[in-house]
């Protein structure tokens, strides 16, 4: 049995030294997803000419802000795979050092992996929506990653997102136990989606905001939780989904299907 | 709103140097429970005569194997409390050093805290059963604690327990990502409850066991997952509960109540 709702695929093209290069990728997975060190089924192909060392370097750097920032259920699988293959058929001058061409390649790679991470999260087991938490103003990249991942991984945040319930305390709580030092008195939080945005917390104080308006914003298929810490310049984004009755059905009752 | 099903209380008595001493405790909480460094609402009283330093020492030692081994939803609350008060009214010779009397006191304290941890887990938000995972044969106490806590915290283990589904792979998976070194080829796993016990994994191989019998064992109100690693002498037990539709209802829909 698989919990995939749709095939997860993406293809893009980009220019390196006048040559059109292509990149395609596909992945699978809906549950038991909380990648750690590039783990899940994710295959990327490209026709770029690039040395194996730089290809590995690009992938290893990329996973820190893509698949390692993704969590459906905090259940890291022990047998997932992410791999990239480059054929060189694009006939660009082979990339053999970390120059501008390499940066273009890394950006293309990142657009592919982030796109798939968002799809995996949005179509997570039983999920009704994508949750993206962007933490900015952190004192280090590592802190920003830990904080944003704590928010999207929290069962209480995930259930409140399922219920479209603007319970700001649960977000502050998840930030609080993430294991990172920050000043709670400077935290701003904004809920954002296709329906608009609303500031729900400023300088660490939960505002008396319009709950119905907040509910409307949280009811969309893609919801963004923006957290500004005012404590530095580091930023990170984590990808997750809500926790619904269907997650329980899929993972607790699946044999009866 | 509280998610407590019943009051959580316990009272015991024990002997120190011929004097009958008493200890009572109560606590609350059903969700946002994954204590870290003695966090939750838990109050303990005793009439034992004991120095404040030793009272603190007993409590600090105790939490490592009691409340810090408890998780309902991995959502550590930022404002929980555990405290102990000793009046000295039992008139035992005051305990002022870590002697045999202190050990009797620590054992009494542990019986109280473990009892409440089991109650908190069993009555966790939406829970239908207590899950206790005992890991033995680990190479260190810390490893044993991390492994057992990973198992009871896994959403996939918790949903399989809700569905009474003997999916041994999910337990092996949680052990695998706990961040501890052990030999997967030596792992034995036994499911145990009031309905009996069944060995489901031996030397790391999932056995072809009687699934209906396993389901019957997992259907009880208290289920024990015994994991033997054959890699050392350390042991630890973690306390958790299953993840049910009602957890989603309580935490996703609670404002409509």
Image: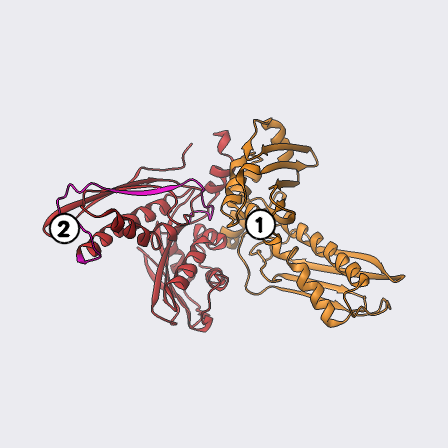
Chain colours: A orange, B red
How many angstroms separate mark 1 from mark 2 (CA)?
49 Å
Label annotation for residue A149: 1
Front one among A80 and A151: A151
Q: Is residue B72 magenta?
A: yes
- Is B82 above or below relative to A56? above
Q: Residue B21's x, y, as percent?
A: 16, 46
Above or below, A51 against B90 in this view is: below
Counting from the top left corner in percent of width and height, residue A223 is at 64, 40
Element marked by disc 2: strand
Mark 2 chain: B
Residue A122 at least partly seen: yes
Q: Observer-nearest residue: A37 or B132?
A: A37
Magenta stretch, overall SS: loop
Q: Which residues are magenta?
A: B71-100
Res A93 quadrant in image: bottom right
Q: Which mark is residue B15?
A: 2
């Amino acid at each position: 049995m698989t919990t995939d709702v749709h095939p997860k695929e993406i293809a893009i093209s980009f220019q390196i030294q006048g040559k059109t290069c292509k990149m395609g990728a596909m992945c699978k997975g809906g549950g038991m997803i909380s990648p750690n060190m590039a783990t899940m089924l994710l295959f990327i192909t490209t026709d770029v000419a690039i040395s194996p060392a730089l290809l590995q370097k690009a992938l290893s750097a990329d996973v820190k802000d893509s698949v390692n920032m993704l969590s459906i259920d905090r259940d890291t699988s022990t047998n997932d795979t992410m791999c990239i293959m480059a054929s060189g058929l694009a006939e660009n001058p082979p990339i053999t050092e970390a120059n501008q061409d390499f940066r273009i390649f890394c950006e293309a790679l990142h657009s592919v992996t982030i796109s798939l991470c968002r799809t995996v999260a949005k179509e997570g087991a039983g999920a009704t929506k994508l949750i993206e938490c962007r933490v900015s103003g952190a004192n280090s990249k590592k802190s920003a990653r830990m904080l944003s991942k704590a928010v999207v991984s929290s069962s209480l945040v995930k259930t409140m997102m399922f219920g479209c319930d603007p319970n700001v305390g649960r977000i502050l709580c998840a930030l609080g136990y993430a294991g990172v030092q920050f000043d709670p008195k400077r935290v701003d939080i904004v809920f954002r989606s296709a329906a608009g945005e609303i500031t729900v917390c400023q300088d660490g104080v939960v505002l008396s905001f319009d709950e119905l308006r907040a509910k409307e914003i949280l009811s969309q298929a893609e919801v963004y939780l923006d957290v500004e810490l005012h404590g530095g310049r580091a930023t990170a984004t984590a990808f997750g989904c809500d926790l619904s009755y269907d997650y329980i059905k899929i993972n607790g009752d699946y044999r009866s299907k």
